[in-house]
Image (tube, rainbow, N blue to C red):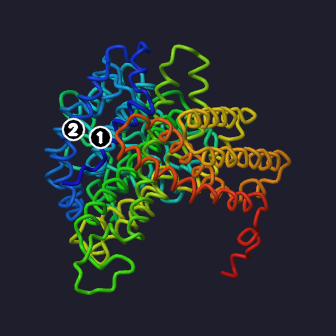
Amino acid sequence: MNPLVSDRFVDFLLYDVLDAPSLTTLPAFADHERETFDLWLGACRRLAREVLFPTYRVMDEAPPRLEHGQVHVHPAMRAIWKELAELGVIASTRPASVGGQQLPLTVSTLASAYLMAGNLSAYGYAGLTTGAAHLIEAFGDAWTKETFMAPLYEGRWTGTMTLTEPQAGSSLADVQTRATRTDQGHFLLRGAKVFISGGDHDVTDNVVHLVLARIDGAPAGTKGISLFAVPKRRREGDAWVDNDVSISGVIHKIGWKGLPSVALALGDRNDCHGWLIGAENSGLRCMFQMMNEARLMVGVNATATASVAFHESLAYARERTQGRPLGVVDATTPPVPLIEHPDVRRMLLRQKAIVEGALCLLATSAKYADLAEHATDPAVRERSRLLLDLLTPMAKSFPAEYGFESNALAVQIHGGYGYSSEYLPESWLRDQKLNSIHEGTTGIQSLDLLGRKVVAGGGAAMMAWREEILSDCARADEAGVDRARTQSVRDALERVVALTGALGARGMKGDVNGMLAHSADYLQLASILAVAWMWTRMRAAVAGRDEAFARAIDRAAMYWIATEVPRIEVLARLCESAEPSYLGLDPADL
């Protein structure tokens, strides 16, 4: 059976690379130890392999349908949801005071990768519900916490993030949904939302939408956006009544087919009640908490989707016989497994380098998140926050973009079977494409990285990142890693730092196009460096592991640094020169 994610690799990340048990010295995680981490990992592995993965294909083949205003999903989802809720997946990282287990995000992230790899659509209900409940936990008042947060964390209801509007897309400054104040403590909302994942279903009795809207009279742009909790059904006395949230359509997606995406109409009867979360006109600031969490969740989803396909193609390459070794012309000799062919090994090693490099990047980001929130030293919290903010656009986009390539390689290795629906790789390829669009496209992430994160605070985050990479290169040198490799990473780092300074200087002078026109190339080169850093960390930490495992880590590190790091220079030249092919293009000429 497909393992979904490598247990041995996850244990290596947690205990050799990231030293997760060190987090138990922090008061927030004092009740945990390695044994509790392993118990949680084991429970999630079993649920993923025994419950989620066996339902993936049937849910992919029977997408949600809209009948008489109600979205119906595959009936298997109800049993899955019960198991997810009973295990405690929704509130696993939250405090005991709200019903959680207060696990480090570092551990939860790696455990959730199994669930996502097993059935990403099924996990999507839980991930969105966690984010919605945490938003209310952070910014809601006592009434909204009691009314909405508790049922969400308990799994009695599910939650959504309801941002996008048909006319605005990703431009939240153009949100038009209105909120009218009443004298009864709630607002009346009216507007349209689209692409709302989990926006309606028949798995639970209620859905709580976290909606961005403008209170009447609010200023234009993002400064006039507020946040509201809007349930599908609201309580009136002892009854639960329709809250005037209707489904105007179901989106027919190429992937993630088990999780409905819907268009919502709010307040068609002028009876859609919403309750303010946080202060008026600060909705986007509040929502950024859920958005940033969702960006990392999308990164894990992308990595998990690439991982399950990698393990599928690896097993297929070991079992499927075809052709003969290079140089063998005797047709009477038996065919060899695909993995014996050098080009197949190239594709498998590239998949491994992408999947495991991405998983290490996400787990590292999760540890920074744990330290940013829970470290006792304020300086450690601030440094960790800087690094987390810097890495988030890369941790979201790299797994999605390179993960799509990795999934395509899985299809390629399966040959003609790969592009047939009788085999699973084609469905994972479809799923993967959504991840470069979910929670901010790759272009949006690139503008965030170059336009904000690397230049914020005079480049403080960039300098902290430089120190981290140099420290890990020195550790790798001490571990006996080939000095040429670590020097290649150091040289690439300095090239990126210098490029960042030059582009930032352009922006300071008002040349915004010169700074940002090649932001996608900048995001790619920064991501290549980030993953080279991860492979350097892993190579330094692998000493003492069994020989075959250590050799595989060494080969993947060698591959990434030899084949990808040199591309940083090419991409840097494009950024540096503000290469003008599309900048100067007249749209009429296309």
Name the foreground residue: 22 vs 165: 22
Question: Horizontal placement of 504 versus 198: left or right?
Answer: right
Name the foreground residue: 14 vs 553: 553
Q: Which residue is painted at 77% across and 50% down in the image?
A: 503
Q: Earlier in the sequence, mark 2 or mark 1?
A: 2
Name the foreground residue: 338 vs 499: 338
Q: State how far apart marks 2 and 1 are (Cα).
A: 7 Å
Q: Amino acid at mark 2?
A: Leu
All told, the count of numbered labels is 2
Q: Amino acid at mark 1?
A: Ala
Q: Which residue is painted at 48% across and 54% down in the image?
A: 165
Q: Position of residue 112 (x, y in %)?
A: 32, 40
Q: Position of residue 383 (x, y in %)?
A: 61, 26
Q: Secondary structure at mark 1?
A: helix
Residue 219 against residue 195 in the figure, above or below? above
Quarter-of-image position of residue 39: top left
Identify the image quadrant of the N terminus: bottom left
Classed neighbour count for the residue bearing mark 2: other residues with Cα under 10 Å, few (<14), some (14–19), many (≥20): many
